[in-house]
Amino acid sequence: MKSTLEAPLAAMLHDVPAGAAAPCCPSCQAPVHGNFCSRCGEAVAAHAPSASEFIHEFVGHYVALEGKLWATLRLLVFRPGQPTVDFLRGRRVPYINPLRLYLTLSLVMFALIKLYGVDLPQIGFDDRTFMVSYSHSVPVAAKPDKPVTARIELKAYETNGDLYVLREAIRLLGSVNETWADNAKRFVNAVPEEKAEILNHGFLANLPYMLIGALPLFAVYLKLIQFRSGRRYGEHLVFALHVTAFAFLLASIMIVIPGNIIWLAAAIVDWRPALLSGWDWLQLLPVLWIAVYLPVAMHRVYGGSRWGSWAKSLALMTVHLLVIFGLILGAEIIAVLRHA
């Protein structure tokens, strides 16, 4: 039996007045001694949250801004593959969760895309030609403060007479959905600027879905390429999350710094280096960085020979880029068919 002093002391330690009944948990109705229910963890002293508490809750759950983020980024950038190795070995407290890292860096990249914008190549049609071109503002030596718009024709296809295949495709679309056929005709007859606007809108609107869809596929390629490792799909998915998060980080850097990687590629293909600035060439550094990063990360996580890691990473990047290109093409087709 408890002494007469123990009850008042217990009441003081649990913030319950002597002689008063302990409050009940609002969720499971169990008696509560203290601020939280020992059975389900419900807070007893609940109150309506303020606006600042709402913001803190959102940031805390969906965006990683605490000290763990910077420790994770240092490891992610300077030790390729090490975040995956540590996570799979159970060393997880010092760093943020791979999915949370992925979501945080993707939100940063999407915000920068919204702020700076992305211009895609333009598509042109007439009765005899299908053409892909890209326009970009470049400085002029005589007037460096007044850039002019330069245009590069990336590819032009001459057809034998009328664009029969395109018109037949639109006719078949009309048999399925008349609205789709009307939108496709409107796109074909639009001026290049309007075509570019439709394609840009479709790309930006569907980019999050494309990236989400490409992520599990990336892990599938990994499992096929690294089938001898004996690792489970979830382990490959962790590696895919870390590598994709690093790619988001590099993409964010490329968006912020001056220069244009698409214009760089267009000028190189058309061999017009005079139209490129030093900032355009600087865009190559992040591209080369991710090309080196992936084989180093794969070697650290999966082992094997270094040359084997380079060969597997090259195959992985080739397949993944082809899939992303297919997803982009599908998104653009959807944008054209649904454009009103």
Image (cartoon, rainbow, N blue to C red):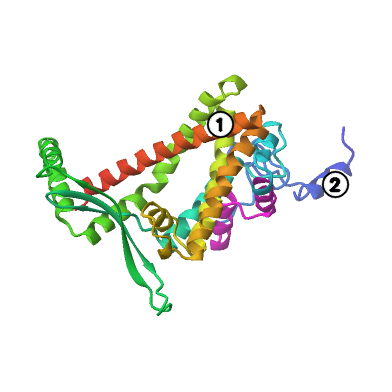
Q: Distance between the residues labelled 2 and 1?
A: 70 Å
Residue 93 lies in the magenta stretch:
no
Above or below for 64 versus 171: below
Is disc 1 placed on a helix, strand or loop?
helix
Question: x%, y% of residue 339?
Answer: 22, 51
Q: What stretch is highlighted in magenta?
A: 50-76
Above or below for 66 versus 42: below
Q: Predominant secondary structure in magenta? A: helix
Question: x%, y% of residue 201?
Answer: 31, 54
Residue at 52 percent of width and 56 percent of height: 252
Asked if residue 19 lies left or right of residue 241, the reply is right
Quadrant the N terminus occupies: top right
Residue at 26 percent of width and 48 percent of height: 335
- Label pair 2/1, CB-CB below 8 angstroms: no
Q: Residues within 10 Å of mark 1 (few under 14, many from 20)?
A: few
Residue at 67 percent of width and 53 percent of height: 70
Q: What residue would you read off at disc 2?
A: 9
Q: Residues within 10 Å of mark 2 (few under 14, many from 20)?
A: some
Q: Nearer the viewer, residue 202 or 31?
A: 202
Question: x%, y% of residue 113?
Answer: 44, 58
Residue 65 lies in the magenta stretch:
yes
Q: What residue would you read off at disc 1?
A: 311
* Chain-order first, disc 2 or disc 1: 2
Residue 191 position by quadrant: bottom left
Asked if residue 235 lies left or right of residue 158, the reply is right
Residue at 56 percent of width and 46 percent of height: 290
**Is residue 242 visible to the viewer in this orientation of the structure?**
no
Q: What residue type is labelled 1?
A: Ala
